Amino acid sequence: MAIDYRTLSLTGEPVRNDRSSLAPVPRPAAAASSSDTEQMVSLTDLAARGLTLEWFEAVAIVQGLCEAIIETGNNSAPAKPDLNDIYIDSAGGVAAASDGPQPPTAAVRCVGEVLSKILPSNDFMNLRSRIVPKAASPTPFYASVKELSDALAYYERPNRYQIIQAVFERWQTLPPPIVPVQPRSNDVDVLKRKVRRPRGATTSKWLQVAGAVLLFVAAGGAIITWAVKTAPLSSESDDDTLTYSNDGSGRAEAEEPSQRTVDSRAKPGKASEPVRAEVPQRAPVTPRFLYRPDQPVTEISDRNPNPGATLSESADSVPETAAPTPAVSEIRPPAPVGTAAIYKADDRGITPPKVVYPQSLIPSTGARREDVLIVEVILNEAGKVDSAKAIDLPRTLGESLVLTNALAATKTWRFHPALKDGQPVRYRELIAVAIH
């Protein structure tokens, strides 16, 4: 049965010049009054000119495709995720070729694979690992295209039509792709003939190599055998074995081995006395202790300072009370002269800064703590980020990646500076970074 291809607009209706507005995102006035000269370009043609989409542009296009499928009422969508069948136009609309009603899971899987194909490699929001596996799997996590669209709405930026219009205008400025010239049919390819050596010559070569290796091994073995036979025999040492005692004195005593060599100069009938070898006494090792400088150090000794004293002398002696050790006070360096004060939201007379770029930044007070990670930034008088640090520690590997990307991107954030008495001042701001 032949497939009935129908072209879907952003509203799910056949493409014509009187496209209606969408809710809840209204189209701008320029886009709503589209003229007869509207142009369309497929996503394949976008890539053919070397145009790379940003992550928020890919989300805007896929959201337009989702809304087109939803408003058909029967999941009319392409049967396969072919970028040749999905178009954007100069008014910011999205259209697709329909293969008729599709099962909900098939429509979700088609949209998920389209998102996977058009996402850039530098996926800042990690949509390739957060959304795509749940949508493009054989059994999608989302039960319908509506659920997938609701999940993408968390990452979507406002003004979808202007974003798609900017993509179309950027495509128009790129030069057309260069079509390679096909070679003429009368061109003759010259093939190099492979020269094959005779089999007898190859066998003879390997035999020569094997003979050389065997000759080298035989020569090495002969040299090793000759060296072993001519080596002088080492005389056994008659020295006594030294055994070091572990009594802490640092001396080493020479013990008599079980079988000693009889001294020929010793007189018969008298056993030779063992000779003690005196070893220089080692210098005592002073232990080193590690302590914090902000804590007092008290030395505790459990050794008897007079080991020769008797029990009675120790009992009669009166213990002396040790003088208390003074606590070591922490010395802090003085604050650098000329450093500007850093204000925060609860200071009097302070006008908080306003976000300039990116518009998706939200303060920490506008989000639930379980859905975000808090990053503290220090803004200078020009509205730029001087320093940034994480307030919340990541709990998973995914949150660690999100936090690392956010800290790396803080240098590109721009704000209108905070004001005190009409003058720009340094300011401490808390920003919430989404983790889902």
Image (tube, rainbow, N blue to C red):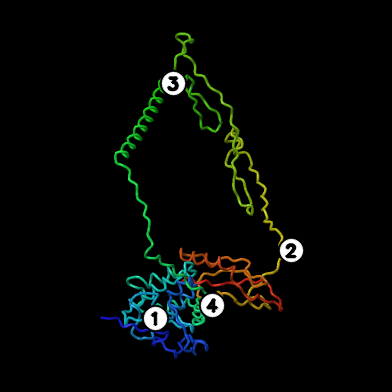
Q: Amino acid at mark 4?
A: Gly
Between 111 and 197, which is closer to the camera in this rendering? 197
Look at the numbered disc 2 and give the secondary structure of its residue.
loop
How crowded pointer 3 is (Cα within 10 Å; few <14, some 14-19, many 20+) is rated as few
Of the 4 image quadrants, the one containing the N terminus is: bottom left
Q: Report x, y in % for residue 5.
A: 33, 82
How crowded pointer 1 is (Cα within 10 Å; few <14, some 14-19, many 20+) is rated as many
Q: Report x, y in % for residue 282.
A: 58, 31
Say which residue label 1 marks.
96
Look at the numbered disc 4 and give the secondary structure of its residue.
helix
| Residue at the right extreme of this rendering | 337
* Residue at mark 2 to residue at mark 4: CA–CA distance: 36 Å
Between 313 and 399, which is closer to the camera in this rendering? 399
Q: Amino acid at mark 1?
A: Ala
- Tell me, for residue 366, which label it has, or none: 4
Mark earlier in primary sequence (2, 1): 1
Q: Amino acid at mark 3?
A: Ala
Say which residue label 3 marks.
231
Look at the numbered disc 1 and give the secondary structure of its residue.
strand
Is 242 located above or below residue 25 in the figure?
above
Mark earlier in primary sequence (1, 3): 1
Mark earlier in primary sequence (3, 4): 3
Mark 2 or 1, closer to the camera: 1
